[in-house]
Amino acid sequence: MNTITQDDVLKRIHNLPSLPTVVMELLASMAQEDVNIDALALKIEHDQALTAKTLRLANSSFYGMAKQVTTIHEAIAILGFRTIRSLATTAALIGTFAGHPQSSFNIAPFWRHAIAAGVCARELATHLGIHPEQAYIAGLLHDLGRLVLVTQFLPQYQVTMAYRSQHDARLLDVEHELLGIDHAAVGLALTRHWKFPVTVQQAISNHHATDCAGLAPLDLLVIGANIIVHALDLSEDPDDLVPPVPTGLWQQLGLNDTQLLAVFDRTENQFESASLVITT
Amino acid sequence: MSATEVQLTLAQADVGMQLARALINANGQVLMVQGTVLTKTILSTLHKRDVTELWVTHPAPDGIDPDAHDAKEIRQHHKERLQRLFRKTTSTEENHFFQQLMHRYRKVDAS
């Protein structure tokens, strides 16, 4: 089978639809100190589909609001700009890949895992002094490279998935062996192309690192979130495997048993409501 | 009613059952989507939200009988899933710590 080069990836990434301009601006605003919230809110409202989806999420039980919100401005007033920015970004990203033929690739477990990782990353962030919204986005997007592979390199990826299933092997190992590239590297290429914050790019690139030395706090957090949600079985993939824990992870995250158990519990508790994004 | 659905009071619902229909509150908000597998935490949340009835699949997925209220069966299910999820895990210190902790969380022994 032909392997996939970085150049192949870069060429195919251009085939993907662009993210809505407003989402690019929302992502860029994560790295900015001064954000014009009113202007961004107006831009979201100009995208009717995005507004509808964002409001539906904001009105879900996850946020427990006493009354329904009907405008983006109202949602921001109640839930805050950062939460609405996360919701709009999530809705837009899921929409970007919704129309692609994925053949035998089951998209629902993919998004269940992605959203679970986002929720868990947000939980870990509160312990580690990292902004919860950035943690959520990095967790949500950590496997984005898989969607590029499945939508842009479908024949090769189908062989990869079949091999993985047949040999009960780890996906990352099979990607290296058969494709010559892995989904973390592809995710990095995509998020660079889409000009995501550099910290998020790095976290996606490093989420399967085998050693924690030299990694940024957000990288560690996404590695931890990914491992935890695999073990919590939230994707409901019968053939799922818990990834190996890199050397020094728990020590560097600095969480004790009790704190980790609380993270497991809150992740499970919040996940079902958060995953409404898949079905709404 | 579909032959694969059964309506229960919240008191009859148990961990491991799967919702056959979405749970919607009086304001039309979806509280839980169809297919949600009930956990102890979810049941506690539903009590707090004054949910009184719900529809579950019958029989429940993964071989869990919704009529079986035996926590031992649930623990056995968790144990088997953990064994499967960790089937390729090597015995490093970090892996061992995490595996033990996850078993503790699920209240099952790791043997």
Image (cartoon, rainbow, N blue to C red):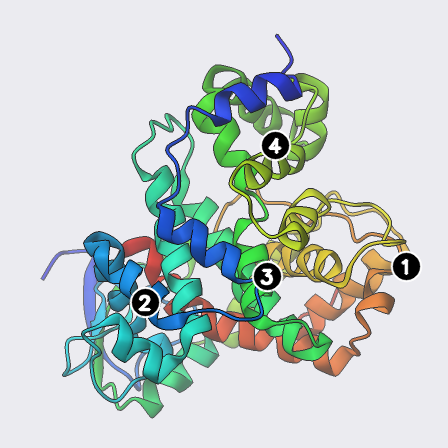
Q: Amino acid at mark 4?
A: Val
Mark toward the viewer: 3 or 4: 3
The residue pinned by badge 1 equals: B93
Q: Earlier in the sequence, mark 3 or mark 2?
A: 3
Instruction: Check the residue under mark 2 and report the chain it is in.
Output: A
The residue pinned by badge 3 equals: A31
User: Residue B19's x, y, as percent?
Assistant: 29, 65
Q: Amino acid at mark 3?
A: Ala
Which of the 4 image quadrants contains residue A79? Answer: bottom left
Mark 2 vs mark 4: tell me if same chain.
yes
Residues at marks 1 and 3, CA–CA distance in whole angstroms = 37 Å
Residue in the picture at 79% in, 53% down: A245
User: Residue A222's x, y, as percent?
Assistant: 67, 57
Instruction: Check the residue under mark 1 and report the chain it is in.
Output: B
Q: Earlier in the sequence, mark 3 or mark 4?
A: 3
Residues at marks 2 and 4, CA–CA distance in whole angstroms = 31 Å
Q: Are marks 1 and 2 in contact (CB under 8 Å)?
A: no
Q: Amino acid at mark 2?
A: Ala
